[in-house]
Amino acid sequence: MDGNMIVKCRSYLIEKLFKTAPFYTFDEEKAALFDTITKTIERGECEDILVVDTTCSLINSMVNRVLEKIRSLEEYDGNYEIIQLDGIFLNDDNEAFKIIAECLSIDCTDMEVSGSFAEKVTFAVQSLLTAGETTKSLIFIINQFERFCLHENQTLIYNLFDIVYYKKAPICVVGVTNDHECIKKFGKRTLSRFSNKIINLRPSNVFETNKHALKSLLSISGTQFNQIFKNEWNKNIEDLCSSQPVIDIIKKISKKPIYEETLRDIVHIILCNIEEESPHITSRTIEDVVKQFHHLTIEDLLADLSLTHLCLIVAIYHHTMIYNSNRFNFKMIYDRYSKASRKFRTLPQMGLEKAEKSFEYLKKDFLSPVQFEHTFLKEYDLYCLTVDVREVKSYINSEIEIPDEIKISFQADAAREKRFIQFPPKTNVVMTMSLLKLLPTETILNTLTEVDVLFPVPIHPYHDVHPRKKREIERNIVYTGLKDAYER
Amino acid sequence: MKSVMKKFPGREQQIKLIWKLIPENNNERVYSSFINLFGPSGTGKTAIIRHVLHLKKKRFIFINCYECCNLRQLCTKILRDLFKKNEEYFGRINSVLDFVTCLRKAGPLSLRINFIVLKNCEYLGTSVFELFMYLQKFLQCEGWNFCIIFIIDQFVNTLVKGYSYTLHFPQYKKEQLHDILLLKRPNYPQELYYSFLQAFLPSVYHSERNLNILIRLVDFLFPIYKEPVDQGKFLMNDVSNLFRNIRPYLQGSITDVFLLRNRFISDNCEKVTNSLDLPYTTKYLLLAAYLASFIPSKYDRKFFCKKSFKKKQKKFSASTPHAEITSLVAPKSFPIDRLLAIYFAIIHEHSNVSANLLSQLTSLVELKLVVVAGNTQENLTNPKYKCVAQTSLIDTVAK
């Protein structure tokens, strides 16, 4: 294929990508919303409606399209005023009121003095009604509606709903949110004024629409390309879209709540990957691009670490395995690391300071603090691992680049983990070698040379006991403590 | 594009994509809403994006979020850079709303800059990050033509969550590091430098992969490596002898560079901190506080009681193994009575509780070696304390 043609084709497709109409049309819902708004404009009725839009699109959102349609109709010109509020920018209701006042061109400096917030809002609305000869309808479009529920007493939305409820003025309140449970956040007062009209935008037939959209976005038409190139390209795309791997990918995408804009972004990146040398889009490229849109995997993160960091990660793994708890502080981890490095001399050596700095680095990506009380010293602060230990294990075992000594130390302690016995709470354990002598030879415990006991160490202060009694105690302990462990 | 790839080896894939995402013409619309670049520090994110934007002759502003401690400062900085006007021109920016109104007042056509590069975005926090993503889309709705490029060093799960495209810059492989270090060659004969890298990289690579640290190491070690050649002791291709020459410096210098410290300065610092000049009795009080926080109270009787058969000689030696066990967890709090009891057990002279002694305890609290634990108002009658001094400090004091 011609290289020049490919470049032209790519820029054409990118242009097309951002000009095509949205794939999810929501015709019924659009008509309903249009009806509600026009009712207010034409007949001066009061309406409130909540649009739950889970597609998270903003640029091509349904509400915007409805507004564009209304703006284009000349018969309504001058009969209405649209006020748009965005929850994400507004921290409290006074700021929102400032915007409303600005839109209605009311001098809000006088307002500061008089009355409560409710009076302010009604006054603002009323003043507009009485000011001109013809009354105007007000349309409030409130984006990120759920954020207004967090404001103090939900004053603004309550007052707006209140105006609608008692039909004080011809306004239409359209709340747009992408939170399913927005209504649950309403207070009792607000809920009593809300008319419970909700439009739920749930895309139906996601898989088919996505598939169709992908195909139409990638295929070319128009006169600027010659017929042979066009046919070849379109056939290629058709084959691609009907092939099994691509269908699998689309199915996978459709299961998750990603719509419209994400799909456009995906197509955009796919188009960016087209080159003069390799003009064909393959299922492999699509797969790679889609993968990058999801979370980065733990393998990616672990691959970026140097060996010193990995040593600490392995130490954390051992700690969680041995003590069966996922809480640790720096001291414990360093202790475990230095034990391992004494055993395996080839492990990378690091001093306390270096280990501390490596630990700081790990904190940002892998650890999250668990805090009960202020410890004042950072090496005693407790943390837990945010990634799954098993994934770390599988990564370390499978990666080729990791040197053998780490793998061996990893496996060595992992093997010991099987022999670990957890004693029931409040069991007295004597940590002497005489314990081994007392045991029958064929038990699993006869190879036990080191006992790791649950933290903190429950030591029986047997020093204080008379030597004659010591023997008895030891015998007792073996029967009470270890017998249970055998039977299990 | 080829020149950029030559300048940044090992980053071909990323450069290719960035090159295509940024449009050729200045007036052309930027299609992608935002670009996320993620990778550990020292993988060329900032350098590449700057270089590409320069080559494409884009006007952009570059902001390091590390410098802006709150949203207000960030917004003011962006506005100031965008319009090249003084702060008085915009008035005080208190919230995002003011920021948006300022932008709106100026109008989308007044904008001559299409790209905003935000570095170190992890310092912004999740909510601000989300806000900027929304702002970007919101302004695009209104016909603004600009793109925010986020550069993220550390993986923050919530930041990257929003189903946006994240371009991952993985850490360099060994061969790539070799290529990059070759590019940064100082003015020395190439052969010598090449052989140095051949020997140097494999020995360092496992413990250190960060490019910045490696460059500093090379700057430090290469002159030492070169010295015998200049003096004529060894030949240029006698790698094993030359490398043996720098081996003693290797491990120490890695640690030094990693900790960003100068050996001479840090030695002095340590001397200053360790020679903490405390009065004789205060030292004992500090030791008593340390012992009280790290030794469980049930051993008190054994270690400090005068009636037990092994008394004073044992207390320090005996306390060490137990201190090792218990010092893995945070220091415990202790009541003042116990502190005084231990103090009188370890000090040789016999003295009484005096105002002098209590004032010394207060001075320890002021020095932040001991802190008051728990609610101070509740514990007026029997206050509790905690020792937060470093173990190394205690060691020197005990000597």
Image (cartoon, coloured by chain):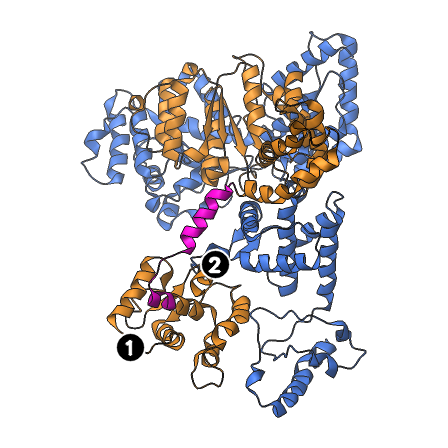
Question: Eyeballing the image, is A403 above or below A414?
Answer: above
In the figure, the shade used to draw chain A is: blue
Q: Quadrant of residue A265?
A: top right
Question: Eyeballing the image, is B108 above or below A164?
Answer: above
> Is B262 inside the magenta-drawn segment?
yes
Q: Secondary structure at mark 2?
A: helix
Residue nearest the viewer, comparing B140 with A373 = A373
Judge left or right: residue B148 versus residue B356: right
Residue nearest the viewer, comparing A445 with B199 = B199
Q: For mark 1, what is the residue?
A: B352
- The amino acid on which the numbered mark 2 sits, given as a three-letter code, is Ser
The secondary structure that most of the magenta stretch takes on is helix
Name the image quarter holding the C terminus of chain A.
bottom right
Residue nearest the viewer, comparing B13 with A468 = A468
Q: Chain of mark 2?
A: B
Q: Chain of mark 1?
A: B
Q: Are marks 1 and 2 on the same chain?
A: yes
> Is A484 inside the magenta-drawn segment?
no
Residue at the outermost bottom position: A468
Residue nearest the viewer, comparing A351 with A306 = A351
Judge left or right: residue B108 versus residue B50: left
The chain assigned the colour orange in the figure is B
Q: For mark 2, what is the residue?
A: B392
x and y percent of residue B108 in the render? 43, 17
Residue drawn at x 57%, y 50% as measured from the top left: A355
x and y percent of residue A385 in the render? 58, 53
**Which contiguous range is marked in magenta?**
B260-285
Residue at the outermost right position: A442
Judge left or right: residue B335 versus residue A354: left
Q: Earlier in the sequence, mark 1 or mark 2?
A: 1
